[in-house]
Image (cartoon, rainbow, N blue to C red):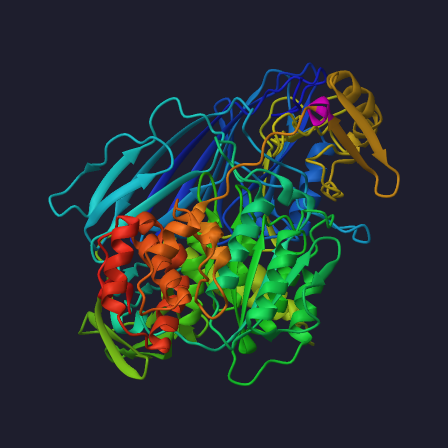
Amino acid sequence: MVNCCGLVSEKNEPVPLKSISVQLQVRDHVTSVSSSLQYVNEEERPLEAVFVFPLPAEAAVCHFSAKIGEQEIVAELQDKQSARDQYDDALSSGQQAFLLEESDESSDVFKLSVGCLSPGQIAVITIVYVMELSIQADDALRFCLPAVLNPRYTPTASAAGVPEVSSASVIPYTLSLSVDVRSSDRISRLDSSCPLDPLVFLDAQHTHATVTLSAGHRFDKDVELLLYYENAHQPTAVVEAGAAAAQTGSLMGDPVLMISLYPEFPADVMSSLASQGEFVFVVDRSGSMDCMMHHGKDAQMRIDSARDTLLLLLKSLPMGCYFNIYGFGSHFESFFPQSVVYSEDTMEEALKRVKNMKADMGGTEILQPLKHIYSQPCFPDHPRQLFIFTDGEVWNTKELLDLVKSHAYSHRCFSFGIGEGASTALITGMAREGSGHAQFITGADRMQPKVMQSLRFALQPAVDNISVDWTVPEGVTVDMLSPPISALFQGQRALIYAQLKGQSSGKTEGAVTVKYRLKDQPVTNQLQFTLKPTEDTGRTIHQLAARSVIRSLELEERAGGADAEAVRSRIVELSVQAGVSSAHTAFIGVNKDSTQTVKGPLLQRRVPVPHMLGRSGCPPMMMMCAAPKMARCGRRKRSTQPTHTSLKSAPMMADCAMAMPQMMFDSMPCAAVMMDDSSDVMMVESDAASDPAEPEPQADPLLQLVSLQKASGCWELNAALAAVFGKTEDEVTNHRPAQVDGSVWATVLALIWLHTCRSGDQVEWQFVAMKAASWIRSQKPDGLTPCVCDGNVLLGGHVTQEALGI
């Protein structure tokens, strides 16, 4: 089958994005990323290419240039509508032009328009962006270069939409990547999901290192880098000098300070878990959840993994809390009209419904279920905790984040991006605005460990009462650029930006004191910093500080008010001054020195497109220009194209749209194509669907064991439990000590089995075991010590009574 990928030619042959080169400059907790993309027009006519691609939600684009032969065009940042008008004017005049703009709907999607490429012409596009590196549960700093931008679902009633783009897995791009790390802390190591050359240290202190991606990498999955520092929890303060050419007193002209705060939680705090709360699990049940977690061996369907995860969560909740489960797609439903008290009966009722959950609810509309949840009154002394699971394919990200932020006072939000291509703007944004924690499950990652880590965060106390005090010489003032931080939870890190204004005639040192409380204990950190850095280390910290201010202003603008236009003007002014992208600005470059204008109608092409479908035997999705009908993984989702296009390309786009159905029939000889009249969605049925069903995979013994546990934490002695141990019911019953009853014996055996046979998965069963141990202690049984000894003999373990927590 021919796949539409790259800049698609008239013959449906993939071409012109030939290579991608990426350079990372890491400084402590932030990075500057330079990406160069090489295009070639292999058409016989001039081309307008539209390339839609993902960037991390936290990224701020700060440079855009294009090189045509020896001619380099450096784009300017302008008001978005002015840039669009200038782009159209240039194309109408036959001039080469380039336009880079952020999506109106989602801050992690950018559209690059490459206008008037002559036949055979090569264009090298360079995009530079800056971003904060996210922190992981094991203290690593994470950078991800996404290979996938999943399609964003747009409801029928909406005219807006994010363009359809997907996996690069069959696109013949080459990728080169190099990393340069400079830090105030010693670098321990740098790991990756892809093969790397050895890490090279450039100084004796191990604070400067470089590494490159091994040659021959196929860009068919996200490139993930994990950077480890020796003293990850040590607070730091880094000052970046202002730009000499910028006006003193402006954000770019003054020094800017970045404080990193990543508290370490003592062991006694980590072990103290709350027993109260309202836990609301919100699960994506759209068609896309019926795709594989990854394309490797033994991959689960996304919805199957979600079901297993809900089983663990339901078994791990504390008695007496409240809970509910929502499923959403084109509509939503909840297990209970409102959250119910966690008990044996409510848990069993929920588990029955979890077993029947399918990815059968159409599109991805998460706004309405969230509005319904927020409309429900909270329970006194039971803080609301939202756990949201989605593959991130939504279109109205900014509206969603505004909703979460408006209810941040009443809940926390933990979000989980499932599969490569989940929207970073959505997943990280919901966690940020809801003071929670974000997790991404990609590649061969298992969902359950990451979700259970977040459950631990939800049950633990937080750092609160955070204050920042400054000690600076006379003549110097400090202007905070970051919004105030109300709380920090285990696994969260805060970066605080501040502008240093004025001049000191004498002292060149300052200090910042950060105070907070952790479980009623006061903590104080004082950090020294210089007012006049001697080394020019670039503008990354300035640009990220500007990005922080711009994002706050954008939230203020969307909140409405009489001065909305004044806020918009401030956004544009700061964006242009700092040279960083915003929702109201775009980069525009025009080759005014071209010796000849381009004549004739422009072809319009979009890139990249193949969506590697989840099930074995499903053909990749196709897309030609503006064709409205898609064959996609059995999901009923509507796609819309960018609203901004060149008028010259409209006839060609219409021709391509009309030709698409025939091309699909021609290219899918072994598939049946059906049209859903009600939704304008083309459904594809592969011949493979008629093959005999494969045998059901054997259930994980850990999940079998967990499924048998009662809400109180105990197990019953029966044949199903014995089978998990690899024993018969008679074997287990005959070894039971006379002085303990069957439930105590069964629960002790379950604990021994977990510690003996699944010790490596403790993060998944930790709460299950804690409930079991608490239940045993509440029974105050006699003869517990010989009971543990007999259990070890039966199961071949060597676990002590202390290790079991009983």
Foreground residue among 259 and 400:
400
Taking the image as shown, residue 302 lies to the left or right of residue 178, namely: right
- Boundaries of the magenta span: 686-690
Q: How many marks?
A: 0
Residue 328 found in image quarter: bottom right
Q: Is residue 433 above or below residue 382?
A: above
Magenta residues, dominant SS class: helix
Taking the image as shown, residue 200 lies to the left or right of residue 112, namely: left
Foreground residue among 770 and 750:
750
- Give the percent coordinates (x, y) of residue 679: 84, 43
Q: Residue at x 54, y 74 (%)?
A: 411
Q: Is residue 534 above or below residue 462?
A: above
Farthest residue to the left: give it. 204
Taking the image as shown, residue 615 lies to the left or right of residue 147, namely: right
Residue 216 found in image quarter: top left
- Give the percent coordinates (x, y) of residue 51: 61, 34
Q: Residue at x 75, y 29 (%)?
A: 684
Q: Is residue 231 above or below residue 785?
A: above
Q: Is residue 783 above or below residue 54?
A: below
Q: Residue at x 23, y 64 (%)?
A: 786
- Give the percent coordinates (x, y) of residue 239: 28, 61
Q: Is residue 528 magenta?
A: no
- Check the picture and name the quadrant holding the C terminus: bottom left
Foreground residue among 244 and 52:
52
- Give the percent coordinates (x, y) of residue 512: 26, 74
Taking the image as shown, residue 525 lies to the left or right of residue 634, namely: left
Q: Is residue 688 magenta?
A: yes
Q: Residue at x 37, y 53 (%)?
A: 732
Q: Is residue 581 visible?
A: no
- Check the picture and name the quadrant holding the N terminus: top right
Q: Is residue 285 visible?
A: yes
Foreground residue among 175 and 140:
140
